[in-house]
Amino acid sequence: MALIDSKNITFTHLLYEATMEAFEGLGEETMRALVWQFGTKGVSFAPDSFDIQGVAKELRELMDDGAESLFEEIYQNVVCRLELLSTSLEYSDNDLSNRAGRLSAMQKLQTMFGGGWNEHERDTP
């Protein structure tokens, strides 16, 4: 999945891309089933209004503790995307270029996902 123009990407877009990449790893049919299931619960999968909190809640309901591995994959996908963005020449014009802003966003993501991972397993952007 291609990154949106680095000048215009928001953290919501980044979360959408990272989540869809994790879901694609489950296979096309499983990804479509998850997106459909979440849609029936009112969870938005549009890039501009992606509802990561709704996704986290619904994944926990569907998969119980199994959701943690997907949360970890989504988190790592976000870290990778932030690293890619930081190497972009246009990235300095983006709100995500501020290290404090990135750390704040990642802390919020950890809180949403429950922060159940070991700290030594996680890289900080």
Image: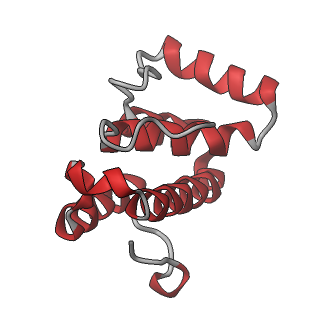
Residue closest to the eye, 93 or 28? 93
Residue closest to the eye, 47 or 84? 84
The part of the image, by quadrant, that contains residue 24 is: top right
Question: Is 29 situated above or below 75?
Answer: above
Question: Is 14 situated above or below 49?
Answer: below
Q: Among all residues in the image, which is located at the extreme top?
A: 40
From the viewer's perspective, tell me whether residue 91 is left or right of residue 66.
left
Residue closest to the eye, 89 or 100? 89
The part of the image, by quadrant, that contains residue 87 is: bottom left
Quadrant the C terminus occupies: bottom left
Residue 66 point in image, percent of width and height: 66, 53
Quadrant the N terminus occupies: top right
Residue at screen point 47% across, 22% down: 45
Number of marks present in the image shown = 0
Residue 88 point in image, percent of width and height: 41, 57
Residue at screen point 51% across, 40% down: 3
Residue closest to the eye, 27 or 17? 17
Residue 123 point in image, percent of width and height: 47, 78
Q: Among all residues in the image, which is located at the extreme bottom?
A: 120
Residue at screen point 43% across, 20% down: 46
Residue 74 point in image, percent of width and height: 54, 52
What's the image's color scheme?
Answer: secondary structure
